[in-house]
């Protein structure tokens, strides 16, 4: 990370605010949909396995979008991609909102568009975040990801309010879709132009993403991010169930444990940039990885509920910087930022797709609580790969 003092450039300040808006908005959109899943399930009379297949439409859309999103950002710029994907995101929500009354096929179609938009939007806003971080002269990417967390909380709370007020799913998601499609393009108008980052660089071509897939450092950072994504996804999906089943707690206590996990992760992302600026990525990530690994083991083997809560805090706080630091490391060099972030995100997001069923399969044989130890294995791998996050100052020439 640059040691230059923070810039007072008003363009950068506006870019910071616009990037926060992009992260918060995508979190809000996703949580708004997620808050209405129970009503959609009930209306369509879906069994758990059927609901799981429906939800795979989001993952399928995202995984198709991610490999090509780097080329889209290189060609059109992060602002235009985020704006376009916000409109597609809103369209997908509208299809779900209206199609919800006509059958599961329409919901699956809408969720596919929604997932595609989320995936490309994610890459574009991370590229912009890395650009802002370089111009600002200090770490800020983790705080952008904390903004995403804030957006999910806001979306979940507003969704809960809609349920409590008996607002129909169609009306709720239509309003959210329209707001996202109309407001986000306005909010991101002050993105810092990123075309200059690759203008005149012949290396940024149609083959740049393919080139990034052959770079050893990029692939290893992708595995590093995958480990943290697996840890985060497992915490999101299984913390409450592991507490309820493994510690015989009530549903309220299990949900509270999940909330504690999320709060610790958000706090780590908010305070983490100061640590990164002071000690550097590699030292901080190795310490944070050890903290998260210890938290997982305390959570699983603590024996009593309050100790498991301590483990949840350490687990969430320790993993908080992994994903954003991986994005920053991939975008160190402006000319290849978009394709590298695309590759890293593609690898990392595989964890969100495969993590829940892997833990569920292990849970059938070991109990859900014990299956969470799979996270510790991947975090140990992340510790070994932390050195790859060292800031790059020249294009890597080594290929996988």
Image (cartoon, rainbow, N blue to C red):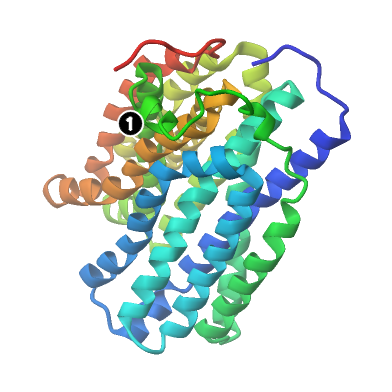
Q: How many numbered marks appear?
A: 1
Residue 49 is situated, as x and y percent measured from the top left of the image, at: 21, 68
Classify mark 1: helix, strand or loop: helix
Report the side of 280 relative to 354 (left or right): right
Image quadrant holding the C terminus, namely top left
Q: Which residue is located at x 40 percent, y 23 percent?
A: 218
Can see residue 129? yes
Residue 369 is situated, as x and y percent measured from the top left of the image, at: 26, 45
- Dot 1, crowdedness within 10 Å: few (<14), some or many (≥20)? many
Q: In this view, does 225 lie above or below 179?
A: above
Between residue 93 and residue 362, name the one nearer to us: 93
Q: Which residue is located at x 42 percent, y 71 percent?
A: 110
Can see residue 247? no
**Quadrant of the image occupied by residue 263:** top right
- The outermost residue toward the left is 365
Residue 108 is situated, as x and y percent measured from the top left of the image, at: 34, 72
Residue 387 is situated, as x and y percent measured from the top left of the image, at: 44, 12
Report the side of 387 relative to 172 (left or right): left
**Quadrant of the image occupied by residue 133:** top right
Q: Which residue is located at x 31 percent, y 49 percent?
A: 353
Image quadrant holding the N terminus, namely top right
Q: Which residue is located at x 75 percent, y 39 percent?
A: 16
Between residue 274 and residue 121, name the one nearer to us: 121
Q: Is residue 387 above or below residue 273?
A: above
Q: In this view, does 365 lie above or below 177?
A: above
Question: Residue at label 1?
Answer: 297
């Amino acid at each position: 990370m640059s040691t230059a003092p923070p810039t007072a450039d008003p363009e950068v300040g506006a870019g910071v605010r616009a990037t926060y808006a992009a992260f918060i908005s995508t979190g809000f959109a996703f949580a708004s949909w997620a808050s209405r899943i129970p009503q959609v399930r009930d209306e369509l009379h879906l069994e758990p396995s059927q609901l799981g297949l429906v939800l795979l439409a989001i993952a399928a859309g995202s995984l198709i979008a991610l490999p090509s999103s780097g080329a889209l950002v290189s060609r059109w710029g992060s602002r235009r991609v985020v704006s376009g994907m916000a409109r597609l995101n809103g369209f997908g929500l509208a299809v779900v909102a209206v199609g919800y009354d006509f059958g599961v096929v329409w919901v699956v179609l809408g969720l596919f568009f929604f997932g595609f938009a989320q995936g490309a939007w994610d890459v574009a806003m991370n590229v912009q975040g890395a650009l802002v971080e370089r111009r600002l002269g200090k770490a800020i990417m983790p705080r952008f990801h904390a903004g995403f967390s804030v957006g999910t909380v806001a979306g979940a709370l507003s969704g809960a309010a809609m349920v409590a007020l008996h607002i129909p799913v169609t009306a709720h998601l239509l309003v959210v879709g329209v707001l996202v499609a109309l407001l986000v393009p306005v909010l991101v108008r002050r993105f810092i132009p990123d075309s200059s980052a690759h203008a005149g660089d012949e290396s940024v071509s149609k083959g740049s993403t393919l080139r990034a897939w052959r770079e050893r450092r990029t692939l290893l950072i992708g595995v590093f991010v995958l480990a943290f994504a697996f840890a985060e996804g497992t915490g999101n999906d299984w913390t409450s169930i592991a507490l309820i089943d493994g510690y015989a707690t009530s549903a309220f206590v299990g949900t509270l444990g999940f909330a504690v996990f999320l709060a610790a992760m958000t706090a780590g992302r908010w305070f983490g940039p100061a640590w990164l600026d002071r000690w550097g990525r590699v030292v901080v990530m190795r310490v944070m990885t050890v903290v998260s690994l210890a938290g997982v083991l305390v959570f699983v083997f603590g024996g009593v509920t309050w100790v498991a809560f301590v483990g949840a805090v350490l687990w969430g706080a320790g993993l908080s910087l992994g994903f954003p630091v991986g994005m920053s490391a991939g975008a160190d060099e402006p000319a290849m930022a978009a394709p590298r972030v695309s590759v890293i995100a593609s690898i990392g997001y595989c964890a969100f797709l495969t993590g829940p069923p892997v833990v569920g399969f292990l849970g059938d044989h070991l109990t859900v609580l014990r299956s969470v130890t799979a996270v510790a294995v991947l975090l140990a791998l992340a510790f070994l790969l932390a050195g790859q996050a060292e800031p790059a100052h020249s294009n890597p020439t080594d290929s996988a």
